[in-house]
């Protein structure tokens, strides 16, 4: 899922380069960057995390307000769209568990049951080891 949200980039009062960023459609979603490029990166990360929390809690992503409806209120402020690739972000940072069915030999299942193994935890460890992922 790709989402576009308007963002307000407000220049720091005491610095030539830094920006505070507000995403009006995502209440409380505010971040900052020490230059415009960093502020854009931080805005995308903050907004993606905000939306991912909503999606993982079973709520839809908020609708985006038209860019033309976001008023510029501060001199030097930049109003621009930010691009959120929610599939990529969820793949990297998502906590939601997914159910996978699998088949194993009966003898292996009997041994695992006898050893009181947690199938989910064991499979996660094996997959992480196989993929070279550290927890």
Image (cartoon, helix red, strand yellow):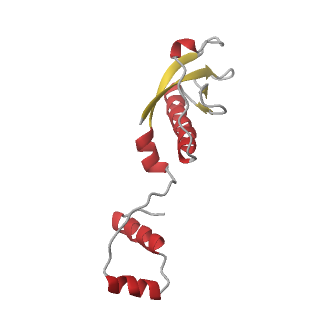
Q: Is residue 97 above or below residue 71?
A: below
Q: Name the residue at 37% across, 64% down.
A: 132
Q: Name the residue at 44% across, 49% down.
A: 92
Q: In the image, 27: left or right of 129?
A: right
Q: Position of residue 108 (x, y in %)?
A: 35, 84
Q: Position of residue 91 (x, y in %)?
A: 42, 49
Residue 134 in view (yes/no):
yes
Residue 16 in view (yes/no):
no
Q: Is residue 107 above or below residue 50?
A: below
Q: Position of residue 67 (x, y in %)?
A: 52, 16
Given residues 20 and 48, the one toward you in this image is: 48
Given residues 92 and 10, the one toward you in this image is: 92
Q: Residue furthest right?
A: 14
Q: Name the residue at 43% across, 60% down.
A: 99
Q: In the image, 82: left or right of 46?
A: left
Q: Where on the picture, by quarter, is residue 100?
A: bottom left
Total marks placed: 0
């Amino acid at each position: 899922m790709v989402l576009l949200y308007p963002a307000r980039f407000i220049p720091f009062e005491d610095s030539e380069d830094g920006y505070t960023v507000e995403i009006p459609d995502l209440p409380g979603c505010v971040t900052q960057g020490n230059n415009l490029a960093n502020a854009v990166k931080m805005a995308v990360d903050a907004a993606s995390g905000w939306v991912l929390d909503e999606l993982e809690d079973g709520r839809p992503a908020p609708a985006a307000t038209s860019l033309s409806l976001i008023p510029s209120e501060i001199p030097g402020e930049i109003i621009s769209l930010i691009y959120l690739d929610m599939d990529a972000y969820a793949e990297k940072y998502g906590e939601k568990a997914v159910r996978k069915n699998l088949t194993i030999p009966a003898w292996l299942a009997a041994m695992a049951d006898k050893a009181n193994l947690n199938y989910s935890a064991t499979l996660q460890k094996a997959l992480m080891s196989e993929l070279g992922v550290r927890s």
